[in-house]
Amino acid sequence: MKPSTTSQGSGTQPAPPILYCLRHFTEYRYGKPVEHAHNQLRMHLRETPHQRCLQRSLRIQPRPSWAKQQSDYFNNLVLWFELDRPHTQSKIFIKHLVEVRPETLYPAGQTPAFRDMAELAREPELAIHALPSRLVPTTAALRDFAAPFFAPDTPVLEGALALMQHIHDSFTFDPSVTSIATPVAEVLEQRRGVCQDFSHLMIGALRSLGLSARYVSGYIETHPPRDQPRLVGADASHAWLSLWCGPQAGWQDLDPTNRQRPNGQHLVTAWGRDYDDIIPLNGVISGGGRKSTLRVRVDLQRVDAAER
Amino acid sequence: MLALFDQYQPAADRHDELMAGQKLRPHWRYLAESISSLDERKLTERRLELQRLLEEHGVTYNVYGRSNRRARAWALDMLPLPLTSREWRDIEVGMAQRAELLRLILHDIYGAQRLLREGLLPARLVFSHPGFLLPCWNSEARLERQLTIYAADLGRAPDGRFWVTEDRTQAPSGIGYALEARTVLSRVLPSLFRDSNVHPVLPFLRALRRALLQLADNDPDAIGVLTPGPANETWSEQAYLARQLGLPLLEGEDLTVAGGRCWMLSTEGRRQIRVLMRRMDDAFCEPLELNRQSVLGTPGVLQTVRSRHLCFANPLGSGVVENPALMRFLPELCRVLLGEELRLPSVSTWWCGLEGDLQEVEARFDELVLRRMASSPGSEPIAVSHLDRAGRDELLHRVKAQPSDWVAQLRTSQGTAPVLTRRGIESRCLEIRTFAVSEGDSFRVMSGGLARAGASSDSWRVSGQLGGVCKDVWVLSSESQREAQILPQLLPLKPRPQHLTEPHVADNLLWLARYAQRGELLSRLISATLKRLIELSPLPLDPVATVLCRAVSWQTTLYPGFIGPQGEAALADPLPELLRAIQGPESGSLRQDCRALQEAAYPVRDLLTTEIYALLNRLDDDLRRLDSLGPAVRAVEITGLRLSALNGHLLRSLPEGPARYLIETGFALESALGTVRLLRSLLMDAALVHETGPLALDLSNSTGGFADAVDLGGQGGVIYSLLLAQDNPCSVRHQLMILERNLRSSRSKAAADRQHLEAAVADKLVELGLIDLAALLGGSPDKLDQWLHALDDWLRHCAQQVERRYTPDRPAPATQLVRTA
C-alpha cells in the first residue's frame, strides 16, 4: 500500500458510520496443473468495536473439496480449504459490506507515561506482543532508534506518534526495494520499504523498548483526486500496527506509512505478532510447475445507505 | 578387591556407580565377580560375540544412507549398569510425576495459559522459545493426549541423588536402542543375566503399543511411525522400533491430507491414519502452517489435528517444555499444579532472565555450564571452567547483554561408572536415559533404559564427545523374573500380505532382487573378462577380450568406457576402466550395485533371515583399493559367490506369497534385461560366436535349450537358447513366463493397471513364440540388433510399469504459494 497524501487525520469530531463495499479478487495461474492444494485464508474482516460486517460472500474456484473455518489464537477468522481436482488456475473472490464507525480519538497526552508502561499487565495477550517474533526481532539498534522519542514521562502514545512522524519523514516509500520479507535490520539501514516494512520496523522499535505492539493487516481507502472518477482496483492490502497504551486507552492504531492514526478509513482483517502470523493467503500446492502468476485486484468503495 | 577392578580410579568429586569410597557397592558384587572370573580369552570371545550380534541382528547395520555415508556403529559396553530396585522405584515415581507435570504445563501453554496469566511461568520463557508454535494453540486439546512418550536424561548429584539433566518431550529417541541393548547383552552374558533377576524392559514396549492403540481407538491399522527418512542419524533405530511395534514406518511423502483427514498412501490405495508416533521434530511435520521450508512434512496435518482426525504422539509444539530454563520453575509449578513436591529434581538450574539468578550465576560462574535457552546447532553448552580468562570474561559479557537467553546449570551434573575397555575397567561420566509412556491418566516407566558413558570422565555434552559407549541398565530384582526377556519372538519374520502394501516395502523388495541379480551377472562378466586378460597377458587384447570389455561397459552403463572413439584408448590399457567398473563411485559399478542392494534391503530387513544380513553386511568388503588383475579377480569372484548365495537364500527363505513374488519378479526382469544386453554385446559378430557363444551361455548360467536349435547354426543356436528356449530357465522367454505368472497371482492397487500390464506381457510372449529367428538372422547384420534393441526398450518400460505398480501414487512435489524468509 502507498502512502496517502492527506495530512494526519487528527480531527477529533466523531463522524457518522461509513458503509464500505470491499471486493478482493485473487487469481493464480500455473504453468502445469496443480494436483492438490492446501490453503489457509485470512481475508475475512474482523469484528472490532469500530467495525461491523453486514454482509460477506466468498467464492473459490475450483470448488474446494473440503473447507473448515476456525478462529486462531488472536481470534482472527481463518478458513482452511483444499482443492483436490487438477487445475491450472484458481480464483478467490471475497466481498464484504462493512460498516466503520469513526470515533473521537483517544487524546495521546492522556495515555500513561512511558516509564509506567514497564508495569504492564502479565496477560499473555499483551506479553506475546512485547517479545520478539520471527520477522520482528528486538535489537539494540532498534532501541536506539526509538529511545529519543520516549523520555520517562512522555505519554506513551505521544512518543509513538513522534516516532511515527520520524519514520514517515526519514524513510522513503519504495515498493521496488522490498520483497515480502525484508529483514527489519535492512529496512532500518536502507531507510526504504513498503507499509509492511514500516510496520515491522516500528513494532520492532516499540518492542525493543518493552512496549506491546501488534501487526495489523487490512485495507485502506485511498482518496481519488477530487475531479477524477474513483479508479477501481487502486486500493490494496495494507498493514499498520497497534500499540498497547494501558487499560484506559487500550490498543491504539498507528499507520506509519501514512503518518496517521487510523480512523474510519482502515478496515481490519487480522492481527498477530507479524506478517507471518496472518498471511492473507497461504498455501502448499503439489504440482503447478515452476511458474505461477498472481493477479490481485482490490476495490474499496463507499456505499450510500440508499444504494443498498 | 577383584582382579579386573583393582586399577579402578573414580573421580573424587562425583558419585561413582561402582564404588562407595574404597568399597564395592553391594549390588555390584555378583556382577563384578562374574566378569572378573572370565579370563582374557573368554572376555575377548564375549566381546566378539557382542559385536557380531550388534552387527547381524541389531539396530546397527552398515547401511548407506542417501548421503552415501556409512552409518556409525554404536558401541555397547559389555558391562551393564546395575541399579537396585529401591533406587529405581524412586526414579519410576519421579519420572511418572514429572511426565504428568509436563503434560499439564503443555496443556496450559497451548490452552488456557493460566500459568502465564498468574506469573508462574515468565512469558519470555514460553513465547521466546522456538519450540513454542503458536498455530498449535488449541483451546480444545484434550489433556490425556498432550503427552504420550516422555524421556529424561538422568545424572547424579555428587551425593548420589538422581536428577534430570534433560527433559525430552518431542520425539525422544532411544527406546529401540534400549531394547536392542537388552536383547544383545542377555545373549552375551546369558547365565549372569538370568541369575541377576533383571527387571524386563519388554512390558514397556507393550505399554507403548497399548498407548498408541488407545489413541487410535484400538485400530492398529490407523497407526504409523513418522520418520524424517534414512538421512536421519537415528533412522535405523526408528525402523527397528517401528518393526518391533508392528507399525509401518512412514515418511512425510507417504502421507497425504485430503478431506481434512490424514491418509497413508499404500500400493493398494490409501488408508486413514489417526495416530502418528513421530520421530520428526515438530515444526518439520507441517509445511503449511509451521515450517514453510520443510520438505519432510505433510501439508495440512495440523488442521487434521485440530479437527481431531489425527493425533501425534507427541503433539506438535511439545518441544516448548524441553527448554532447560523451565527446570528452574518446575518445583513451584509442581506444587501449584499437582499439590506435591517434585520427586525427581532437576540439576541445579538458573535462568539468567531473573535478576537474582543472574547474580548467583555470576558469583558461581566457574562451577557452571552455560547454555542457550533455545538450543540450536552451533550453540553447544559451554563449561566455564574449560575457558581461559579472556573467554570467561567474554562469555559473561554475552550473558549479561542478553540474560534472558541464557540458562546455567551445575557442571558436575553427572556421576561416573566403570566401562570395560581393552585396557581394563575405566571410570567414565554417565547419563541414563529412561522413558515413560502414558497409561490411562498416569504414566508407566521403563524398568531400565540406556546409559551413555562419555569418552572421558567429564560430561560428554561438555567435552563434545557425542555418543561414547552405551550401557544396558539392569534394574535388579529380589525375585526371579518370569517375563520373557528377549525379543526375537516379536520380530514378524513372516511377511503379512498387508505389510507389503506399506510404502517402501514392496518397491524395496523388488529393487533388492534386481540389484542382486544385476550384481551377480556383472561379477561373472567382469571376472570372465579379467581372466581373459590374464590369459592373454602380456599380449594385446584379442577380439574376444575386446568384446568382453565392451560388454562390461554396456552392462555397467559406465560410458564411454570401452565404447566409441574414446573407448579405443581405454582398450589399449583396459585395467583402469575395469577397476572403475568394479569399485568406482559412479552408480553402475559392481560396488555401487552392492551398496544400492544394501540400501534397498534395509527397510525390509525383518523379512530377511540372519544369513542374508550376514551376507549383506560383508557384500562389498573386498571391492576397494584394488589395483591389479590378480586381486581384482579374487575380489570379484568372492563378491559373485556372496551374491549368488544371497540370491539362493532369498528364494529359499521366503514362503510362497507376495514377498516371494516380488523377489521373483525382480529377478526375472533383471535377468531378462541382462541377457538381452549380453546377446547384443557378445553375439553380434558371427565370426566370434564359436568362442563368445559358450561364454554367453556360461555367463547367463544357462543349461540346455540347444535341442531345438540345431538347425540354426552356432550363432542362432546360442541366441535361440538364451532368448526363446522354454527349457532353459535363464532364457528371456522363461523370465517373461515367470513375470506373467507372478503378475497374475499378486494383488494390485488398480485392476485396470494389472490387466494392462498382464496383457502386454502375454502379447510379448506370443510374439516371442511366433518369431522367425532364421529370418532375423538371415537379414542384414543390423536387423537382429535392432530387434533386440526394441526388446530391451520394451523390457525397461515393463520394469517401470511393474515398479509403478508397487509404488504408491504420491502427490507431485510441493511448493509454497507465499515465500518468506
Image (tube, rainbow, N blue to C red):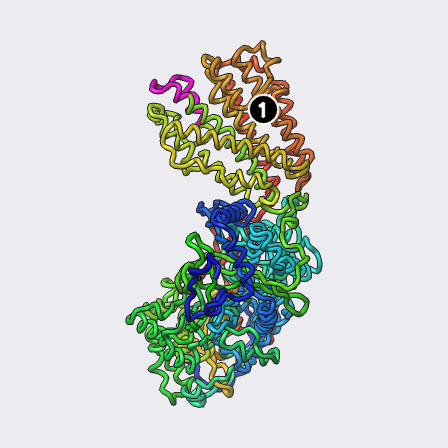
Which quarter shows the C terminus of chain B? bottom left
Is residue B381 magenta-colored? no
> Mark 1, chain letter?
B
- Find the magenta span and give its range: B532-552
How would you classify the magenta stretch by its main secondary structure?
helix
Residue B784 x, y percent position in the rendering: 51, 18
Q: Residues within 10 Å of mark 1 (few under 14, many from 20)?
A: many
Residue A15 x, y percent position in the rendering: 52, 83
Residue B133 x, y percent position in the rendering: 52, 67
Q: Nearer the viewer, residue B532 or B769?
A: B532
Res A2 visible: no
Q: Residue at x 39, y 81 (%)?
A: B359
Q: Nearer the viewer, residue B401 or B781?
A: B401
Residue B571 x, y percent position in the rendering: 36, 24
* Quadrant assignment, res A211: bottom left
Q: Nearer the viewer, residue A44 or B282?
A: B282
Residue farthest to the right, as pictured: B218
Up the image or down, B739 lies above or below B20; here it is above
**Residue that label 1 marks:** B730
Q: Nearer the viewer, residue A101 or B219?
A: B219
Up the image or down, B523 lies above or below A281; here it is above
